[in-house]
Amino acid sequence: MKIVHLDAFRKYGGGQKRYVNIASYIASRGHKMALVSPPGVKVRESFPGRLYTAPFLGDGDILTLAKILRVVLKEKADIVHTHSHHDHWMGSLVKALLGKRIKLIHTRHVDFEVKNTPISRFMYVRSPDYTLTSCRSIKETMIRSLGRSKGFREEKFEPILTFNYPEKWGTPGRIRKEFGIFPGEKCVSTITRIVDNKGHRHLLKAIPEIIDSLGPVRFFIVGEGPYLPVLKEMARELDIEQYVIFTGFRKDIWDFYADMDLSVFPTENEGIAPGVMESLFYSVPVIASDVGGIPEVITHGWNGLLFPPGDSHQLAQFVIRLFTHREEYDKLKRNCAVWTEERKNEDPPGKKMLEAYRKVTGKA
């Protein structure tokens, strides 16, 4: 099969990690991949196929539409696979122009409600031959949003829990040495893009309560994004700068996981957070918001703890609880390893995606 991926996103996030991992698996089975994206974006460095550029300047960008059409015809694509709103709009137009000559598959990576408008119905009900969601929660959101629309067929929506098994294993002690962490000092991280809905501010609000109870704990905010200046100012106002380390973008996130005692994900809205699963792979217990697809990965009291989104006090109490109840902490840590072994015994996401491609095209 020949698959052309469209990705208008200019950053590199969890969605990009997931589809590159899956595309690599499928390419290794002899199928041909191509990507159309804005020039210079990070995902182009690791995508396993031919690379094409398009500006993706907006929904009325005729130049991008023309470029995508040329690529699809040149590649003799069986499938056009889209990943975000803008590229899916373009994919829907391509489908309208080419009809049965291609199959349109959309992966929904985010757990946001979709307004039931004519454009939404065109994009998400009529145009796709199949829609994949990165967790069950996203499928349920799409059903709530569009399920009463004419032509909506629930069987055309399939959740595939997508995860990225670690590319490498970190070196314990390296991060602690780099940042001068004292022996025995507890370390907590949150590794994700720094945008408003990821809820970093709820963690910062919890830190004074944690410090008052436990004494010095170091909090690593790993990542980059437009909300970073706001968080730095907030840390200053809360007088917690000495406990919070803003690392910026790091390529060595595996070394961070190798040195962390806890991972915290205080997100307000989430499909499936890659960092949650990465933490479990490293046997780092997780404290996370009870939202989106996170409860599909974290079982409260078994491999992590879940708190109501935005509840900084409950977040603080859970951190204090795990650092003062060693038996419970050790149980969660052991169960992280059990969860990892269970994932190893499952079919990889790439295999499930390939089966979806075959179902839609009827090709082997």
Image (tube, rainbow, N blue to C red):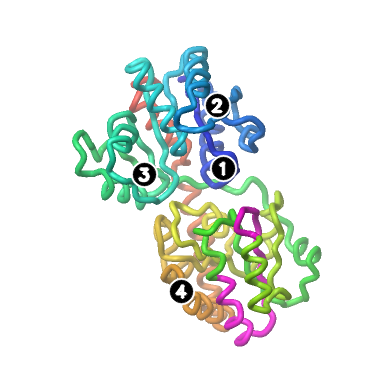
- Front-lying residue, 146 or 46: 146
Instruction: Give the residue at mark 2.
Output: 36
Instruction: Give the residue at mark 1.
Output: 17
Give neighbour class at mark 1: few <14, some 14-19, many 20+ (Cα, 10 Å).
some
Name the mark nearer the viewer: 4 or 3.
4
Instruction: Give the residue at mark 4.
Output: 311
Q: Is residue 305 visible?
A: yes
Outermost front residue: 60
What is the CA distance from the residue labelled 2 to the residue labelled 3?
Answer: 24 Å
- SS for tag 2? strand
- SS for tag 4? loop
Decide: is 119 above or below 219. above
The answer to the question of whether label 3 and label 1 lie on touching residues, with beta carbons closer than 8 A, is no
Question: Residue 328: horizontal and vertical position, in percent?
Answer: 51, 77
Question: Residue 35: horizontal and vertical position, in percent?
Answer: 55, 27
In which quadrant is the N terminus drawn?
top left
Residue 209: say if magenta. yes
Q: Amino acid at mark 2?
A: Val
Please give the label number shown on residue 159: 3
Looking at the image, tell me whether mark 3 or mark 1 is earlier in sequence order.
Answer: 1
Name the mark nearer the viewer: 2 or 3.
2
Looking at the image, tell me whether mark 2 or mark 3 is earlier in sequence order.
Answer: 2
- Front-lying residue, 22 or 232: 232
Query: How many numbered marks, from 0 up?
Result: 4
Question: What is the span of residues highlighted in magenta in the rendered image?
Answer: 203-228
What is the CA distance from the residue labelled 4 to the residue labelled 3?
Answer: 29 Å
Q: Amino acid at mark 4?
A: Asp
What is the CA distance from the residue labelled 2 to the residue labelled 4?
Answer: 41 Å
